[in-house]
Image (tube, rainbow, N blue to C red):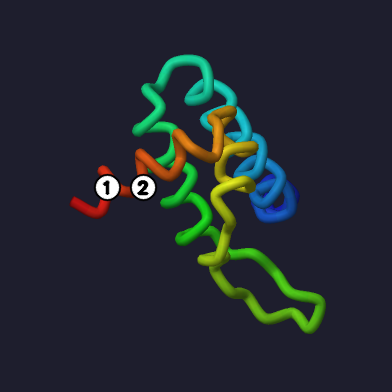
Amino acid sequence: EASVTRYKLLAAPELTIARRNYRYLVGLQRGSPLQRLAYRLIDLASGPHGRPDGAIDPIIRASQEQLGEATQLSRQKINTLLTELVR
């Protein structure tokens, strides 16, 4: 039983990443552009993203071009959707 518990602790980060990647890929295919953008913003704001010094910070700065690449949308469409989200 101890080895099963140890395996679960060792595999947890990889499983978390695999699940996140799966949700991201499915979301790209099924979600509306606004849903895709919202999901990506939530993901960037909530996920722990490690720094070289070991600290964990959420990524909160992303350009419209970067968001467009992450959601397969144009920068102009991202701008429109961000304006819509602000309202």
Who's the residue at 54% across and 68% down the image? 58
Give the farthest residue toward the right: 52
Asked whether, in this view, residue 22 is left or right of residue 37, the answer is: right
- Name the quadrant containing residue 50: bottom right
Asked whether 43 or 74 is in front, the reply is 74
Q: Position of residue 60 (x, y in %)?
A: 51, 66
Report, in whole angstroms, how far the alpha carbon at label 2 lies from the one at label 1: 5 Å
Asked whether, in this view, residue 83 is left or right of residue 36, the answer is: left
Who's the residue at 74% across and 53% down the image? 10
Q: Position of residue 69 (x, y in %)?
A: 64, 37
Say if 58 sits above or below 80 in the image. Answer: below
Packing grade of label 2 (10 A; few <14, some 14-19, many >=20) is some
Say if 53 sits above or below 15 in the image. Answer: below
Say if 57 sits above or below 27 in the image. Answer: below
Q: The residue tagged with tag 1: helix, strand or loop? A: helix
Q: Badge 1 is on which residue?
A: 85
Asked whether, in this view, residue 42 is left or right of residue 10, the answer is: left
Asked whether 28 or 73 is in front, the reply is 73
- Name the quadrant containing residue 73: top right
Packing grade of label 1 (10 A; few <14, some 14-19, many >=20) is few
Q: The residue tagged with tag 2: helix, strand or loop? A: helix
Who's the residue at 49% across and 44% down the image? 40
Asked if the residues shown at circle 2 and circle 1 are in contact, with their CB atoms under 8 angstroms apart, the answer is yes
Q: Badge 2 is on which residue?
A: 82
Asked whether, in this view, residue 55 is left or right of residue 84, the answer is: right
